[in-house]
Image (cartoon, grey):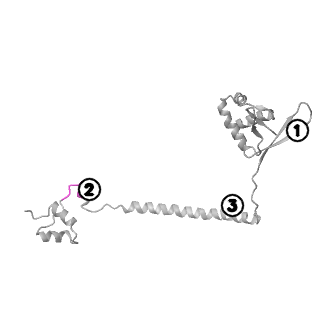
């Protein structure tokens, strides 16, 4: 039997519920705790167990950071004293703003389109209001509808105009209907679409 504690006995001590030190546990068993073996690590041999502490580098860095922070705070104070500082701008804005500010009304985009009737030489002004602005292709489709107002326009004509397949044209018609204020663009009874202005 050895005079030092084995690994198994140390595991027993760790798993026991008693709160005793390892030395007390070894004494109960009539054994000793093995002292640490000498280290063959080069760092331990050179430093002889002393921890490595480099105080000079840490303090130098801390001093540099403090100096930088102090300079930054001084510069910020200089800037805040200028007439263009945030505080001064806020004060001037408060003084110049009226007490009651009315909310801005949502603008409605209105497109004025002029068309010429060839039979009479008078100009007719037509106002068409949109909820949102039209894209380039939607504008081209609407212009075609406007040129052929109160006439039936077919999807194949619009597909030729845009150089797209006929199925793609329906998307632009749907978008124009959604963006128009009134229901001016309607389905024709014989097929196709009609713009009534």
For the residues carrying marks 3 and 2, which lies nearer the camera in this image? 3
For residue 96, side relative to residue 62 (left or right):
right
Q: What distance separates the C-alpha of mark 3 from that of mark 1?
A: 55 Å
Q: Which residues are magenta?
A: 38-46
User: Label 1: which residue?
Assistant: 124
Image quadrant where one finds the N terminus: bottom left
User: Label 3: which residue?
Assistant: 84
Quadrant for residue 151, please give it: top right
Label 3 close to label 2 by CB (< 8 Å): no
Q: Residue furthest front?
A: 189
Element at badge 3? loop
Give whichever of 5, 101 is nearer the camera.
101
Q: Residue at x 16, y 70 (%)?
A: 25
Q: Position of residue 31 (x, y in %)?
A: 12, 67
Give whichever of 179, 154 is nearer the camera.
154
| Comes first in the chain, label 2 or label 1 | 2
Quadrant for residue 110, please give it: top right
Q: Residue at x 69, y 37 (%)?
A: 172
Q: Residues within 10 Å of mark 1 (few under 14, many from 20)?
A: few
User: Label 2: which residue?
Assistant: 43
User: Residue 17, relative to residue 135: is it above or below?
Assistant: below
Q: Residues within 10 Å of mark 3 (few under 14, many from 20)?
A: few
Q: Residues within 10 Å of mark 2 (few under 14, many from 20)?
A: few
For the residues carrying marks 3 and 1, which lies nearer the camera in this image? 1
User: Residue 28, relative to residue 69: is it above or below?
Assistant: below
| Comes first in the chain, label 3 or label 2 | 2
Give whichever of 55, 191 is nearer the camera.
191
């Amino acid at each position: 039997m050895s005079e030092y504690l084995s690994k198994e006995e140390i595991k027993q001590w760790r798993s026991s519920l008693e709160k005793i030190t390892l030395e007390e546990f070894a004494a109960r068993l009539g054994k000793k705790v093995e002292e640490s073996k000498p280290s063959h690590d080069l760092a331990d041999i050179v430093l002889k167990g002393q921890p490595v502490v480099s105080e000079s580098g840490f303090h130098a860095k801390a001093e540099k950071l403090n100096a930088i922070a102090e300079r930054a705070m001084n510069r910020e104070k200089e800037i805040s004293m200028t007439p263009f500082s945030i505080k001064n701008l806020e004060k001037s804005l408060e003084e110049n703003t009226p007490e009651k500010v009315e909310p801005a009304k949502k603008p409605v985009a209105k497109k004025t389109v002029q068309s010429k009737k060839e039979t009479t030489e008078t100009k007719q002004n037509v106002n068409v209001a949109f909820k949102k602005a039209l894209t380039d292709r939607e504008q081209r489709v609407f212009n075609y509808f406007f040129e052929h107002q109160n006439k039936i326009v077919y999807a194949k004509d619009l597909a030729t105009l845009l150089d797209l397949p006929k199925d793609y044209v329906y998307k632009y018609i749907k978008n124009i209907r959604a963006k128009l204020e009134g229901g001016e663009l309607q389905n024709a009874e014989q097929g196709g679409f009609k713009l009534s202005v």
